[in-house]
Image: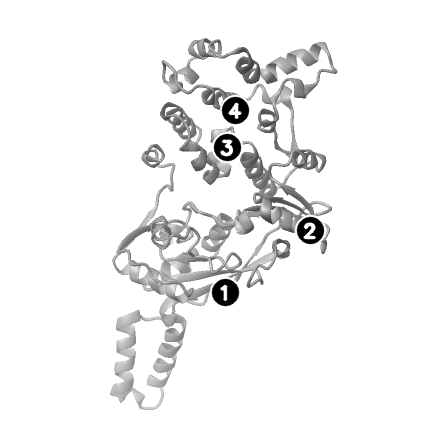
Amino acid sequence: MQKLIQANLYQPNPIEISGFLVERYNKCLELLGLMPTKLKKFTIDAKGWSPEIAKEKKKTHYLNNGDANPHAIIISPLQKGKVVYEPFHSFDTNIMQLIFDRYEAEIKDITKESALCVDFNQQIDVFYETFDLLKYDKITIHFHLIDHLEKIKNEQLQWVKEFNSANNFVNEKLHQKILTSVKKYGDLRHRNLDLKPLKYQTSSFYTKAFGGIFIFKDFANPIMVFESNEWRDKAIKNTTREVIIFHIEESQLLKTLEDYVAIHLDLDKIVTTERYQRIKNHVFAQMFSKTDHLMADILNNKLLFKNYLNKLDIQGRKRLMSVERYLESVTINKNTNLNNYITRDFLEAMYQPHSSLLDENYYLVWKLLTKIAPKDPLNMYKYDKNTFYENFVTWSDSYKDWVVAHIIENSN
């Protein structure tokens, strides 16, 4: 991962937490019913999640109280616009954006002396079965302040009201109460500490619950795509709802999504795109365990590429050029069998979301396609960073260099 860290592509732009902010963070953990961290310094993302604390606790999603109860911690206004490193749901980033769009000024004010614990409440306390995920509709976002600042604000208001009545301005005990509170917490009387709950509407989404599931609810019948065979097998036995169920590796999945106009495949168009060239480069790079030239140089030099293409055996060359060979053949014979030319894994990498999809579903379908056929490194990085990171460590150093440079070039 060092190459990604140096390029600021792995958990980029973290917020450093130390000093008194550690104490506030621990108060948030305690408010959520979690054990405080022993670390004196760590980093956090947009959601307040820390990779160092996750490592300390040996639990990736330590901010969750069970899969059904995700939380966030807002300790600094700098969290606005940052990346969510380990989203539990595909909409986590959207929720954090919603919070800062609505309450940016209030968050800046509150985090001067306090911190916010955020509760994503979807009206489900515990998941009992995978179909519970179909109940997701409106998520209510609740805010809780550490140190009970709302209560202290009300006390200050009451004490000042009492101070201004009758002859209480000479009451030294009351005077001291007010001074002690103001020195410790500041004058809270005119501060907006009451953040009303927000509503977030969700439809289709991805969750890491139950081993990872895609939920598509915008069709005649909901579609659930499981990453876990175990949970897929359990769900298939559940007859309480009309749900279309797939494992992510089932060949019929893409055909069904194509029938539902969620994805489409146009080989004539894709073969002319940069994305196709990335896919082909990726397949090509995995065909060599050792080369005399750096893979990055081979992929950037057409003459070198052709040189190494001809070093492949006949089956390797046919596989790499299978799309071009099929398109050439089909112009001669319209009955040409596609499957005789293009392997399933290569073909699956060519699909893309249908242009008619709304933004949320468009992103979600890209994420699914990336998991099904992880052959486009740029799309992996854009739509499913965990899949990208898992694959990245298996690549040769030179191919890693090419991928890093390509991502940086296409991020500007």
Q: Residues within 10 Å of mark 1 (few under 14, many from 20)?
A: few
State the CA–CA distance, disc 1 to disc 4: 47 Å
Residue underneath mark 2? 237
Residue underneath mark 3? 379
Cβ atoms under marks 1 and 3 closer than 8 Å: no
Q: Which mark is residue 196?
A: 1
Q: Is residue 24 left or right of residue 372?
A: left
From this view, report whether residue 231 is shown above or below residue 71. Answer: above
Residue 192 visible within the image: no
State the CA–CA distance, disc 1 to disc 3: 37 Å
State the CA–CA distance, disc 3 to disc 2: 34 Å
Q: Residues within 10 Å of mark 4 (few under 14, many from 20)?
A: many
Where disc 1 sits, the SS reads loop
Instruction: Give how far across and how far down residue 73 sits, in percent.
Output: 40, 58
Instruction: Give how far across and how far down residue 263 sits, in percent.
Output: 65, 34
Where disc 3 sits, the SS reads helix
From the image, state whether disc 1 or disc 3 is nearer to you.
3
Which tag, 3 or 4, sits closer to the chain's start?
4
Quarter of the rendering occupied by the C terminus = top left
